Amino acid sequence: MENHEPYDAASALDLVSASRAGLADRLVTPSWYHPCLGGLLGLFSASYALRSPVVTVVALALYLVGCLALVRAYRRATGVFVNGLRAGAASRWAAAGGAVSAAAILAGVALDRGLDWRWAPLAAGLVAAVATVVFGNRFDEALRAQLRRR
């Protein structure tokens, strides 16, 4: 049997803490990331104002391709990518931002279809874009703080 002395365990924990802090330092989201993601989501929402299923499907395809491009660019910039829904307690910010954005888009479509407010999907897209930036930044802060905790 190996002899594990207390200072070895403490050293290992210090190494893990230092590694997590280093990762937190690397996970600085580029300033363009959340605005681009919000813009993609806003454009998708705005596509509903045209009331064309073809336009909406094309907008959805552009949104998905744009998201993949953003993930690749983020990985190139930081060396890693963290799924917002699998990031521990920080995921609450990503889920809240997604919920606000989804509610705005659904409300925009409902107001457009139900009350003939053609501008509603445009307003919803703006709300979704702003929510993506605000909640995305909060997610980043929470994730970095979470990684720095021992």
Image (tube, rainbow, N blue to C red):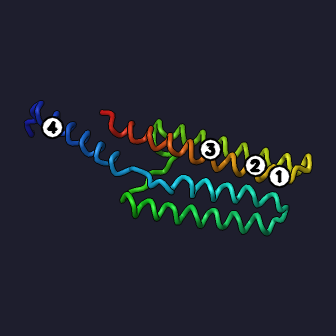
Q: CA distance from mark 1 to mark 3?
A: 19 Å
Helix, strand or loop at mark 2 = helix
| Nearer-N-terminus badge (2/3) | 2
Q: Name which residue type carries label 2.
A: Ala
Query: What residue sits right under mark 2 in the picture?
Result: 123
**Image check: 74 left or right of 23?**
right
Query: What residue sits right under mark 3 in the picture?
Result: 131
Q: Name which residue type carries label 3.
A: Ala
Query: What residue sits right under mark 1 in the picture?
Result: 119
> Which residue shows up at 86% across the image and 54% down it?
118
Mark 1 neighbour class, 10 Å CA radius: few under 14, some 14 to 19, many 20 or more: some
**Image check: 98 left or right of 49?**
left
Query: What residue sits right under mark 4 in the picture?
Result: 11
Q: Name which residue type carries label 1.
A: Trp
Residue mark closest to the camera, 1 vs 4: 1
Residue mark closest to the camera, 4 vs 3: 3
Whether pointer 2 and pointer 3 mark residues with C-beta atoms closer than 8 Å, the reply is: no
Helix, strand or loop at mark 3 = helix
Helix, strand or loop at mark 4 = helix
Residue mark closest to the camera, 1 vs 3: 1
> Compared to 135, does 45 lie above or below?
below
Whether pointer 1 and pointer 2 mark residues with C-beta atoms closer than 8 Å, the reply is: yes
> Compared to 117, does 53 lie above or below?
below
Q: CA distance from mark 2 to mark 3?
A: 12 Å
| Nearer-N-terminus badge (1/3) | 1
